[in-house]
Image (cartoon, helix red, strand yellow):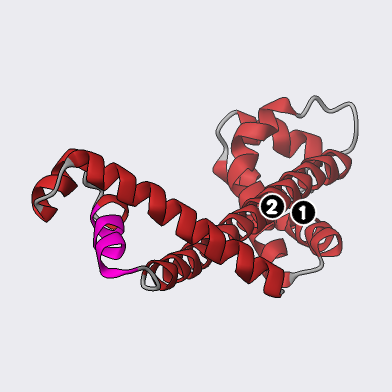
Amino acid sequence: MAIKSDHELVVQANAGDAAAFSEILERHYDLIYRLAYRILGNQQDAEDITQDVCVALPKKLNLFKGRSKLSTWLYQVTLNFCRDFQRRRVSSQKAYEDYSLVNEIRNDTQAQRKRDVVFAYQMINTLGDDLRETALLVVAEGLNHAEAAEVLDIKESTVSWRMLKVRENLSALVQRGAGAL
C-alpha cells in the first residue's frame, strides 16, 4: 500500500473521508503541540490549543489551497490560534486587573465613608442636646425642616436656625482641628 501525500489526504478528508482526516492528525499532531508549547511555554495551554486546532481542523481544511506544504499551513493555523489565545489571556488579565482596581477603589471609598460617618457623629456629639437632636433628625434621618419641627414640637424656623448653628459649630470645630495638624 502506497503512502499518500498530505495533499491527497486533504482532498480525501475534505470529501468526508474520516480515515484520511485521522491520518492527517496522526502525522501532524506532534507538530501542532510542539509549536504551541514553544510559543506558550506551558504544557496545559499547549494541550488546550492543540485540541482547539484539531477540533477546528475539519472546517479549516477547506481553506487549505495546496500552495504550500500542509505542515507550513498547519504552522500558520497553530500560530494564529496561539496568538488569539495570548490576546484573550492578556485581555482577560487586563479585565481582572481593572476589576481588582475598581474593587480596591470601591473598598477604599467605603472605608473612607465609614471614617467620615464616624467623624461626623463625633462632631455632632460635641454639640449641645438641642442642636445635636436637630442635626440627627435632619442629617442622619433625612427629615425636612417641617418634619423635624413636628417631631421636636418647635417652629420650622427654629429648626432652620438650629441647622445654621450646627453648620457654624461644626465648621469651627473642623477649622480648629485642621489648625491643630
- Name the residue nearer the viewer: 44 or 163: 163
Our reading of the magenta stretch's main secondary structure is: helix
The reply to whether discs 1 and 2 touch (Cβ–Cβ < 8 Å) is: no
Residue in view at x 60 percent, y 38 percent: 58
For numbered disc 1, what is the local secondary structure?
Answer: helix
- Residue drawn at 84 percent across, 46 percent down: 75
Q: Residue at x 59, y 28 (%)?
A: 15
Above or below 95: residue 170:
below
Q: Callout 1: 10 Å neighbours few (<14), some, many (20+)?
A: some
Residue 99 located left or right of residue 134: right
Instruction: Estimate the spatial distance between the alpha carbons at disc 1 and disc 2, rounded to whole Å.
Output: 34 Å
Does residue 116 show up? Answer: yes
Q: Earlier in the sequence, mark 1 or mark 2?
A: 1
**In terms of depth relative to the viewer, which is nearer, 41 or 13?**
41
Magenta segment: 128-137
Residue under the point 58% across and 47% down: 55
- x then y, percent, for residue 100: 60, 61
Residue 67 circle label: none
Classify residue 34 as left or right of residue 148. Answer: right
Location of residue 154 in the rendering, given as x and y in whole percent from the top left corner: 13, 49
Give the foreground label among 1 and 2.
2
According to the picture, the residue beneath numbered tag 1 turns out to be: 28
Tell me if residue 103 can be seen. Answer: no
Numbered circles on residues, count: 2
Return the residue at label 2.
94
| Residue 33 in the figure: left or right of residue 98 | right
Q: Nearer the viewer, residue 156 or 23?
A: 156
- Quick one: SS at disc 2? helix
Q: Is residue 131 rendered magenta in the image? A: yes
Q: Amino acid at mark 2?
A: Lys
Residue 33 placement (x, y as % from top left): 76, 61
